[in-house]
Amino acid sequence: MKFDLLIKNGRLVLVDEIIHGAIGITKGKISALLTDDTEATAKEYLDAQNNYILPGLVDVNIHMRVPGQEHKEDFFTGTSAAAAGGVTTILDMPNTNPPITTIDRLHEKKELVKGMAVIDYAFHFQGSMNNLEQLKKLESVPSVKFFMAGHETTPTTVNDIGLLYKAFSILSAKKIVATVHAENQSLINALMERYKDRTDFKAYSDARNSAVCETAVSEIICIARETKCHAHICHVSTAREVKAIKRAKEDGVKITCEAVPYHLFLTQNDCERLGSFSKVSPALKTLNDQESLWAALKDGTIDCITSEHTPHTLEEKNNSVWKAPAGCPGVQEMLPLLVDKGMLLSDIAKLCSENPAKIFGLKNKGKIQVGYDADLVILDPEQKWTVKRKDLFSKCGWSSYEGLTLKGIPIKTLVRGNIVYEKGKIMTPNIGEWIY
């Protein structure tokens, strides 16, 4: 057997087991999984040095800020940060300027970012209050994103349940996933009016509390049941949402959901310490909510983990509680955070690679399996990284996790057999391809 690339001496994190062996790669695809003693030749060899090899992460909730917000991030800086974090495929969010609410804008964005990405990518489309006709014509997208509530960078919201019912009905017939930011805008408005005179950053969490999330998720469950549309709930943050989603799954509703690092690793107790860096949407919740998320990841209620990388400049973030934009970066930190937490690598592979690829129909992504794209991350479980601004690839240049020392980091990332990241450097820029 002769391959283009043979990665030897690795601990391969497969779907059901971890084995010591080698990966043969031909024309960007995994063409063989081999034992160490199998004789094989290749044009190039890579020694994994007994480190773990995971499927490249598939991040389905990330904001590259193109078009219109390139001062925060762009497709090169953002996908560089992703590659450094072991991410090999992204689905970029559509709440840009202008938002991706028309098919023409979708095609324009594809042309705009061509040749900029380090890793593979596709885009979510965005639902609005007046683009049902666009949804009827829509093809070749992984999902349509609906923001039931807005914030500083998302003025395009859909908080009309009747309209959502019509949109879900269209998407159900087309077998396109409805992806939802589920918070109740009307309740947020009432709570923000109540707390508007507060200046502490926990005020934002109180204004976007558990009830805000629970009421919205309950509505989505109802219309998903009625329309038989696959609904995917982004960034679940509360115990109440977990309970409702678990019950809906048991009732046969086609619903999936995700958790994000800032809800898994931060709580309301961090608001005072982090100040404006704690302002995210959905807001940080309680320790009990956080514990419920970890339990739901273990029992399968939560299907995947995504970064929700939402960069803003330091100048923008250094503002008061009601003026600072919501969101934080985090795609480069996500995998080290999860490994340092002690998550099983097999669970990380399922939650961060296999499941998100399956949910959004990303063929040949998310597994170390013959025939799949050779999207891989080599992880050194012993190497430590102290999060510092100088090491971050994101254009925004800051992290809510700055100063943390994390054990277990990506040392090489491969996209279709090409080394795109290695030990702090981008090695092969601009090879990312549209995949949908």
Image (cartoon, rainbow, N blue to C red):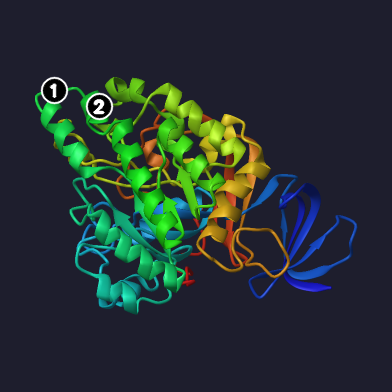
Q: Is residue 384 visible?
A: no
- Tag 1 and tag 2, C-beta contact below 8 Å: yes
Q: Which quadrant of the figure has residue 92?
A: bottom left
Q: Is residue 386 above or below residue 145?
A: above
Instruction: Mark 2: give few (<14), some (14-19) or many (20+) Cα within 10 Å.
Output: some
Please tell me whether mark 2 sits on a helix, a strand or a loop: helix
**Foreground residue, 207 or 24?**
207
Q: Residue at horizontal 51%, vertical 64%?
A: 428
Residue 434 x/y as whole percent? 45, 72
Residue 138 x/y as whole percent? 35, 76
Q: Which quadrant of the figure has residue 296?
A: top right
Image side of residue 170 versus residue 31, left or right: left
Single out the mark in the foreground, 1 or 2. 2
Per the rendering, the mark at residue 206 is 2
Q: Residue at horizontal 24%, vertical 31%?
A: 276
Q: Residue at horizontal 69%, vertical 46%?
A: 52
Residue 267 x/y as whole percent? 38, 26
Quadrant placement of the N terminus = bottom right
Image side of residue 413 versus residue 35, left or right: left
Q: Is residue 47 above or below residue 102?
A: above
Please tell me whether mark 1 sits on a helix, a strand or a loop: loop
Q: Is residue 193 above or below residue 177?
A: above
Q: Is residue 124 visible?
A: yes
**Foreground residue, 387 or 368?**
368
Report the amino acid beneath label 2. Asp
Instruction: Mark 1: give few (<14), some (14-19) or many (20+) Cα within 10 Å.
Output: few
Residue corresponding to mark 1: 198
Image side of residue 69 versus residue 432, left or right: left
Report the amino acid beneath label 1. Arg
Residue 148 x/y as whole percent? 27, 50
The mark tally for this picture is 2
